[in-house]
Structure formats: structure tokens, C-alpha cells
Image: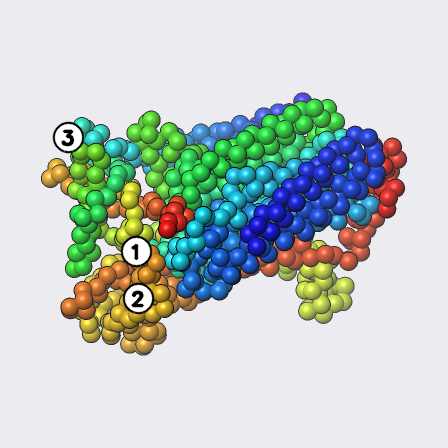
């Protein structure tokens, strides 16, 4: 019996620790994860909130200003276009990427100010060999 | 040659199937000849798979672009080492490599079973053969590396430039050695369960296999982190990407397994906790492959999304369900867990270690799987979640690493423990005082470094204690030190591993809490100071090279007035790919790394943009990885000391006792 209790206690510790973590650290480290359309529909409450958006990059809109190290581009999702500015290190794979994930804030001037840019690279492996 | 390769693969599947049938029938009918045939067929599988790997290497080197795999991953201008490493650059090759490594391990399992020590070898060989058959089916029917195109391309697509780094040659195979290696402890565990020999010593059976796989996985993961650091140009080494987590998760459970193997009474018989940890580790290895190959969770590693994920899911379910059913059937015969006699004792400390490691795994697994519900909840997790939860769980674990060696197996001696912990505690307090004196205001850092000092002092005291008792018996210092490692390899090897973990912790804390990062632009001749380093921009060049164009900025680095380095960050533009590749320049010292990436330039003015990062203590992560390797090798080194010989005679005696009435009668063949 004693041994059984010990196991129950051990199990309870695991569950308690994990639950505690879920509650505390998940609350402090979650962001809204929205499509461009959803982002637009939640104006104005969404201003000032941390949001993550994933969408296609419009290749023709990409512009990088050397002096300010600011990257600007448009995210496209169907009819919706979302202008984005990003300050920080641009991943090498951005040049080839189709879909990117940005994280930051949507500002009232209609521009998404991102501080995180994650690139989902179209894998080289997916390319088909053609004649 | 590609036909020959495919033919040998088919032969390997045939011999593996034969060995499964032979072993299963042999076990059922207790027929020694069938068992022997089944085992020999495994050798044949290893030979055929080796030939298949040689065939793939041949077509890669011959640049036979009609083979789709060759055309997809290499090109005429690809350097020789990378052409060879293309063996594991793609999915088809990786699977073949996996199957090949598994066949080598299977051979080792059969060979190690030839000694009378391991009478379970028929059962374990059967389990490994089943796993091998699974991979062979995948390689032959789903992802055939020898698939041919109906035309011959003039050149291949080439290898992703990011993969063209020396780490590509070492990192993937070492990680695979770890992943595949866990098949063996899994097979041995199932063998015990199937055969019902639950009283046999289980711990010595799996310990070495577990350690080898654990070591490969750990070292491979550190190497992968270093690769990310030098190649990806963002100054980081760990991003909590699903693929990174996929190697960390089984590493955590296998670390827990190693600690559970230390809890041994009943001559180290199989316990439920061992089964849980072995199956969890093996399942997490398969799970990692499933997650990254199925596209279920998107990763920056972006392997080709394919239906192969479904096969792995099926395999995963079979592994878990099979293990649960077997354990349930044998539940009455399994020994109870090793409990602790008193609260403050070695067994309790080991149990808490195991619980914390499993909790860390659970937290990271949850975070890894969270994207599955992100779309529904409209909420995503940031990397803060991982950083926070792993710090909260692994922090106390590292503290425990400093306490555990001072506890006694029997326990109950709290006063004595407190007295023995006094010196480490003083070390920790002195470190805290020193850091505060040096002006460190960040409480997290002070706390973390103090804990590291606590563990370091405690671990070194263990060495000191061992040396002193050996010196007392008259040995000179050097031979006392050597005999420490010779007589108690596992104990002192383990302490060396702990020191490696402390070094990695120091590196992680230093580089994450005190990183300085700045984006700057410089005109030619201008200088800028970041974190005590002054960088003067001398010149810029843009030159064509083999297969690529290379942009280089030359910077002279001063620390104060003293010139300490010339750094040349580059950006490469490979002709075969539109993606530029940053080649960062790093000045590495034990104190900190100065990390410079060239992020852009203007052709006319030759103005450049740089990302400059000062990352304290980061080099200790790589050093810690090396120390971990050394410690594990010490623990693994085959022993000839009296202690171990004694143990193996004890084992042989056990074996003798059990061999009466053995179901297969295999020992008779020896």
C-alpha cells in the first residue's frame, strides 16, 4: 500500500507541475493567431495586442532600406493585403520563401509592425526534377 | 547500378522476412536450427543493406542524374564530401541510412547474444528484425532512393546551400545513430516481456545500449545547435523548432531512463518504470520522425511533406499498443518499484530526477503539439513558453545534480547531508557575492550561476573525496586519479557528464540573459562600438567564385585600443539557388563571442549593414558537449577491473540458475 501511495504522489507531482506550468507560462506566452481577414475584423480591439499572422508574401512588394534596416512587404491572403514592416535580422531563407509568419502589433495606420519574422522555406527537396 | 541497389534492397527484405519467420517459428517450436537460421538471415540483411548503401554512394559519386534522388540532391559542382553526405540529405536516402544502421545494430544484438550471458537474443533479434522489416518496406515501396526518371537531366538541382556545412557530414548520422540505437533497449525490453523472464538481471542488459544511444543523441543535438549558430546567421542556436524538440524529447526520457537504471534492487530486474521510459524514448524517436515528415506541424526544417507520416503513425501506434498489452499481460510477474527507505536519500533524489525529466518532456511535448489547436483557438504559443517552462523544471533539476551525490542510499542522515553540503553552499554564496560585486543586477543570472557553482563545487568534491581515499592507501596522485576512473567508471564518468551539463547551462544562461544585439550601418572607414568592441569597416568586395558570388566586408576589431581580430563576414549567392547564405564571422573566446553577419550593402556607396551580436559564454555550450562525450565514453569503456568482473560472474551464476528449464534451450548451443 505504502508503495502505491508513493507512486500516486509521484504522479500527482508530475500532473501538478505540468498543469501549473500550463496555466502560468501559457498565459504569459500566448499570442493571438489570426488570418489577415480575422485581424481586420477585430479592429479596433486588436490594436496594441500581440498578434501572429501567417500568409503569403507578395514578392513584388518586398523592399529593404539599408539605412534603417527596415524590411517592408505585403502579406496577401485572397483579396486581403496587409502591409508589414519588420525591423531586425532578415533570415536568409526569406528571399525564397512563399509563406512567412510575423509577430507584432497591428497599428491604427494600417501597417503591421512586426518584430519577429519566421520563414517557412519551401524545401529544396520538394522541387521536382524537370526536363 | 541503381537496379543492383534496388535488387539488394529486395534481397534484404527477403532475408529479414525469413529471419522473422524463422525466429518466430523457432521460438514456438523450440527448434534451435530454425533460430540459428533466423539469426544468420539477419547477418545477410546487414550485408545486403551495406551493398545497397554502397550502390547509392556509387550512383551519387558517378553523378548518375537519371536516378531521381541523385538529381534532386546533388549537382556537378557539388564538392565531394557533400556529394557523399547527400546520402542523408533527402528522405529516401535517410530512410535507407536508417535501415542500414538498424541492420548493423541488429547484427550486434545477435552477436552479443552469442555469449551465454544473454539468452534472450532470439526474442530481441525478432523484435529488431520486425523494426528492420518496417523500414525496408518504406524504402522499397514508398521512398525508393533508386527510383529512376524517364529522362536524363543535364545537371542535378544541387544541395541546399544551408546544408553545405561541415556539420552536415557529422550531425545527421550521429543523431540517426542515437534514434536508431534506442531500438535495441526497446527490443531487449520487449524480449524480457515476451519471454516472461522477469527475474533476470535487466539493467546490465540494456545499460550500455542505452548509454550509447543517449550519447549519440546528446552530442548530435549539441552539434546541430552549433550548426544553427554558425550557419543561420541569427546568432541563436536553439529556436524550439519541432525538429529540434524531436531530438530533445527522447534525450530527456532516456536521461530519466539512465537514472532509473541506477535504482537497482532485486539484482536489477525489469520494473514498470523501465518499461515506461524505454517505450516512451523509442516512441518519441518515431514520433519525432512522424512529426517532421508528415507536415502535421510546420517546421523551419521543411522536409518534404509526404504520406510517409501515416506509416510512422501506424508504427508508433503499434509500438505503444503492443508494449501496453505485453506489460499488462505480465503485470503480476513484474517486480515492484524500488522505493526509498527514508525521505532524504539517494532513491528519492533519483526518483525526483526522473519525475522532473519526464515533466520537462511533457511540457515541451505539449508546446510542440500546441500548433495543432492554434487554428481552432486563434491562439499561438511563443518561444517564451518553452524558455519559461524548461527553466522552471530544469533549474531545480540542476540544483538536484549538486545534492544527489551527497545523499546515501539508506538515507535518514539529514544532519550529515547538511554538513556535507556546506562547502558547495559556500561556493554558491561566494559566487553570488562575486557576481553582485561585479555589478550583475539580473537576479535570474545570479541565481543560475550560483546554482552552477554549487553543482561544480559539489562534483569536484566527489573527485577529491575519491582521490583522498585512494591516496590514503598509498597511491601517487596521478595513479590515484587514473584508478578513480578505472575502478568506478560509471560513477566518475557520470560526474564528468554532470560537469558537462553545468557548462552547457552556463553557456545557455550567459548567451540568453546577457546577449547584446545591434543592427548597424557603416560607411567605409567608419567605426562603431558594440559591447566593448570597436569595429572599423575597411573594405568591401564582391567576387565570383566556384558556383557562387561572394560578398565580403572586412572589419578590424579593437578591444579598447588593441587590435584583436580581423573579421570578414560574407554573403554567398549560389548560382543554383536564389537563396543567399550568410557566412558569419565569429571571434570566439572563453568569455564571449563577437558574432558579425553581413546583412546588406549599397553597390554605389559601398555602405554596409551589419548585425553585431556579443554573446557571452556561448562557447561553453560546445565545450560542455565535448565534456559530456568524454564522461559518457569513460562510463562506457569496457571494464576489466575486479568490481565488474565480480559483477559478471554474478551474472553468469544468475544465468546458470535460470537456464534450467529455459524455454528455447539456446544456451545449449554455446
Residue B270 in picture, x, y percent from top left = 71, 35
Is residue A23 shown left or right of residue B45?
Answer: left
Q: Quadrant of the N terminus of chain B?
A: bottom right
Q: Is residue B495 at all visible to an observer of this figure? A: no
Q: Which residue is mark 1?
A: B578
Could you tell me how far apart the alpha carbons at marks 1 and 3 are, in whole angstroms? Answer: 39 Å
Q: Marks 1/2: CA distance?
A: 12 Å
Q: State the residue position of label 2.
A: B549
> Residue A28's x, y, as percent?
33, 35
Q: Earlier in the sequence, mark 1 or mark 2?
A: 2
Kindly indicate whether the residues beneath marks 1 and 3 are on one polypeptide chain. no
Density class for disc 2 (Cα within 10 Å; few <14, some 14-19, many ≥20) is some
Q: Could you say which quadrant of the image residue A35 lies in?
A: top left
Disc 3: CA contacts within 10 A as few (<14), some (14-19) or many (>=20): few
Q: Residue at x 86, y 44 (%)?
A: B669
Q: Secondary structure at mark 2?
A: strand
The chain carrying label 1 is B
Residue B334 in percent (x, y) is at 72, 29
Identify the subunit bearing mark 3: A
Q: Are marks 3 and 2 in contact (CB under 8 Å)?
A: no
The kind of secondary structure element at disc 1 is: loop
Marks 1 and 2 on same chain: yes
Q: Which residue is mark 3?
A: A44
Whether residue B426 is situated above or below residue B524 in the rendered picture: above
Amino acid at each position: 500500500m505504502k508503495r502505491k501511495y508513493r507512486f500516486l504522489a509521484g504522479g500527482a507531482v508530475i500532473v501538478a507541475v505540468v498543469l501549473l506550468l500550463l496555466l502560468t507560462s501559457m498565459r504569459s506566452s500566448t499570442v493571438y493567431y489570426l488570418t489577415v481577414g480575422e485581424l481586420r475584423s477585430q479592429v479596433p480591439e486588436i490594436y496594441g495586442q500581440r498578434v501572429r499572422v501567417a500568409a503569403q508574401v507578395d514578392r513584388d512588394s518586398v523592399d529593404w532600406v539599408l539605412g534603417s534596416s527596415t524590411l517592408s512587404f505585403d502579406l496577401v491572403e485572397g483579396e486581403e493585403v496587409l502591409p508589414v514592416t519588420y525591423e531586425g535580422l532578415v533570415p536568409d531563407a526569406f528571399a525564397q520563401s512563399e509563406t512567412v509568419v510575423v509577430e507584432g502589433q497591428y497599428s491604427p495606420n494600417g501597417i503591421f509592425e512586426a518584430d519577429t519574422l519566421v520563414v517557412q522555406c519551401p524545401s529544396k527537396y520538394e522541387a521536382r526534377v524537370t526536363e | 547500378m541503381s537496379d543492383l541497389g534496388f535488387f539488394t534492397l529486395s534481397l534484404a527484405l527477403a532475408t529479414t522476412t525469413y529471419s522473422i519467420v524463422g525466429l518466430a517459428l523457432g521460438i514456438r517450436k523450440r527448434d534451435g536450427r530454425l533460430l540459428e537460421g533466423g539469426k544468420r538471415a539477419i547477418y545477410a540483411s546487414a550485408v545486403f543493406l551495406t551493398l545497397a548503401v554502397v550502390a547509392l554512394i556509387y550512383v551519387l559519386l558517378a553523378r548518375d542524374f537519371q536516378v531521381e534522388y541523385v538529381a534532386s540532391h546533388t549537382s556537378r559542382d557539388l564538392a565531394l564530401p557533400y556529394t557523399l553526405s547527400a546520402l542523408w540529405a533527402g528522405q529516401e536516402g535517410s530512410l535507407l541510412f536508417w535501415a542500414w544502421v538498424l541492420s548493423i545494430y541488429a547484427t550486434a544484438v545477435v552477436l552479443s547474444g552469442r555469449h551465454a550471458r544473454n539468452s534472450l537474443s532470439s526474442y530481441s533479434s525478432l523484435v529488431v528484425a520486425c523494426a528492420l522489416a518496417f523500414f525496408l518496406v518504406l524504402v522499397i515501396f514508398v521512398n525508393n532512393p533508386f527510383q529512376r526518371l524517364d529522362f536524363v537531366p543535364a545537371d542535378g538541382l544541387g544541395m541546399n546551400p544551408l546544408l553545405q556545412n561541415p556539420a552536415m557530414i557529422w550531425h545527421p548520422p550521429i543523431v540517426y545513430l542515437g534514434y536508431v540505437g534506442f531500438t535495441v533497449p526497446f527490443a531487449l525490453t520487449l524480449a524480457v516481456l515476451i519471454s516472461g523472464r522477469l527475474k533476470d538481471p535487466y539493467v546490465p542488459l540494456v545499460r550500455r545500449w542505452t548509454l550509447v544511444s543517449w550519447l549519440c543523441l546528446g552530442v548530435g543535438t549539441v552539434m546541430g545547435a552549433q550548426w544553427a549558430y554558425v550557419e543561420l546567421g541569427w546568432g541563436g542556436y536553439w529556436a524550439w523548432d519541432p525538429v529540434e524538440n524531436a531530438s530533445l524529447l527522447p534525450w530527456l526520457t532516456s536521461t530519466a531512463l539512465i537514472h532509473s537504471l541506477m535504482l537497482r534492487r532485486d539484482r536489477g530486474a525489469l520494473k514498470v518504470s523501465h518499461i515506461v521510459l524505454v517505450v516512451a524514448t523509442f516512441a518519441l524517436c518515431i514520433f519525432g520522425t512522424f512529426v517532421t515528415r508528415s507536415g502535421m506541424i510546420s517546421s523551419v526544417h521543411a522536409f518534404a511533406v509526404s504520406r510517409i507520416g501515416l506509416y510512422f503513425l501506424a508504427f508508433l501506434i503499434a509500438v505503444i499498443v503492443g508494449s501496453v498489452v505485453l506489460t499488462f499481460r505480465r503485470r503480476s510477474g513484474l517486480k515492484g518499484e524500488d522505493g526509498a527507505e527514508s525521505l532524504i536519500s539517494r532513491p528519492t533524489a533519483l526518483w525526483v530526477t526522473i519525475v522532473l525529466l519526464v515533466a520537462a518532456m511533457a511540457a515541451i511535448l505539449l508546446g510542440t503539439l500546441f500548433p495543432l489547436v492554434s487554428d481552432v483557438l486563434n491562439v499561438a504559443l511563443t518561444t517564451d513558453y518553452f524558455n519559461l517552462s524548461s527553466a522552471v523544471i530544469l533549474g531545480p533539476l540542476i540544483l538536484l545534480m549538486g545534492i544527489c551525490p551527497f545523499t546515501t542510499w539508506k538515507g535518514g542522515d539529514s544532519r550529515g547531508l547538511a554538513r556535507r553540503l556546506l562547502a558547495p553552499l559556500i561556493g554558491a554564496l561566494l559566487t553570488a557575492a562575486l557576481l553582485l560585486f561585479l555589478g550583475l543586477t539580473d537576479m535570474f543570472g545570479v541565481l543560475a550561476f550560483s546554482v552552477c557553482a554549487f553543482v561544480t563545487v559539489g562534483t569536484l568534491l566527489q573527485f577529491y573525496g575519491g582521490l583522498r581515499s585512494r591516496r590514503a592507501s598509498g597511491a601517487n596522485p596521478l595513479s590515484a586519479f587514473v584508478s578513480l576512473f578505472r575502478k568506478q567508471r560509471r560513477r566518475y564518468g557520470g560526474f564528468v557528464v554532470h560537469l558537462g551539463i553545468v557548462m552547457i547551462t552556463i553557456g545557455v544562461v550567459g548567451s540568453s540573459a546577457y546577449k547584446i544585439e545591434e543592427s548597424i550601418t557603416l560607411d567605409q572607414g567608419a567605426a562603431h562600438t558594440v559591447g566593448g568592441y570597436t569595429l572599423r569597416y575597411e573594405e568591401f568586395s564582391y567576387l565570383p567564385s566556384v558556383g557562387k558570388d561572394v560578398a565580403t566586408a572586412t572589419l578590424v576589431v579593437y578591444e579598447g585600443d588593441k587590435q584583436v581580430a580581423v573579421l570578414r563576414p560574407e554573403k554567398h549567392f549560389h548560382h543554383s539557388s536564389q537563396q543567399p547564405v550568410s557566412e558569419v564571422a565569429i571571434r570566439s573566446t572563453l568569455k564571449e563571442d563577437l558574432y558579425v553577419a553581413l546583412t546588406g550593402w549599397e553597390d554605389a556607396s559601398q555602405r554596409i549593414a551589419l548585425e553585431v551580436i556579443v554573446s557571452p559564454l556561448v562557447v561553453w555550450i560546445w565545450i560542455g558537449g565535448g565534456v559530456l562525450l568524454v564522461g559518457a565514453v569513460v562510463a562506457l569503456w569496457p571494464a576489466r577491473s575486479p568490481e565488474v568482473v565480480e559483477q559478471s560472474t554474478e551474472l553468469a551464476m544468475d544465468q546458470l540458475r535460470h537456464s534450467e528449464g529455459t524455454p528455447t534451450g539456446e544456451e545449449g548451443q554455446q
